[in-house]
């Protein structure tokens, strides 16, 4: 499923136009993004939790040459599935 598929599914499920569904889906994505930028968690009971974690800078290796390279520090996004989602998939 991609974003277009999600918009169509939301429009069909909520009986709204695809333009309205597109606005709603984008608003959800924007809200999650803003929350994660503030280093907060976005928790949805039954679905899961989005959070951020800081990954320190580290040394790595170029697999082609074997040369040591520096990998920069960065923030990464984590997702932990909720129990209801895990149960539904299994």
Image (tube, grey):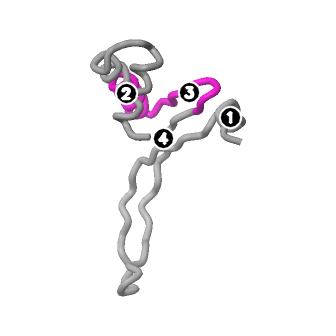
Indicate whether residue 1 is drawn in magenta: no
Residues at marks 1 and 2, CA–CA distance in whole angstroms = 22 Å
Picture disc at residue 7: 2
Secondary-structure class at tag 2? helix
Q: Residue 62 at what x, y percent from top left?
A: 38, 79
Seen at 47% across and 18% down, the residue is 13
Secondary-structure class at tag 3? strand
Can residue 17 be seen in the rendering of this structure? yes
Residues at marks 3 and 2, CA–CA distance in whole angstroms = 21 Å
Point out the tag, 3 or 2, that comes first from the N-terminus.
2
71 relative to 41 in the view: left or right: left
Q: Residue 7 at what x, y percent from top left?
A: 37, 27
Report the residue that reaches farthest toward the top: 15
Residue 55 against residue 64 in the figure, above or below? above
Residues at marks 2 and 4, CA–CA distance in whole angstroms = 26 Å
Residue 19 against residue 65 in the figure, above or below? above
Residue under label 3: 43
Residue under label 1: 88
Seen at 72% across and 36% down, the residue is 87
Q: Residues within 10 Å of mark 2 (few under 14, many from 20)?
A: many
């Amino acid at each position: 499923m991609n974003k277009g598929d999600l918009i169509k599914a939301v429009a069909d499920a909520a009986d709204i136009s695809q333009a309205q569904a597109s606005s709603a889906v984008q608003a959800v994505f924007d809200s999650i993004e803003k929350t994660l930028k503030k280093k907060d968690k976005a928790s949805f009971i039954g679905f899961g939790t989005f959070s951020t974690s800081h990954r320190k800078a580290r040394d790595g290796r170029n697999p082609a040459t074997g040369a040591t390279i520096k990998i920069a520090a960065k923030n990464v996004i984590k997702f932990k599935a909720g129990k209801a989602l895990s149960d539904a998939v299994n």
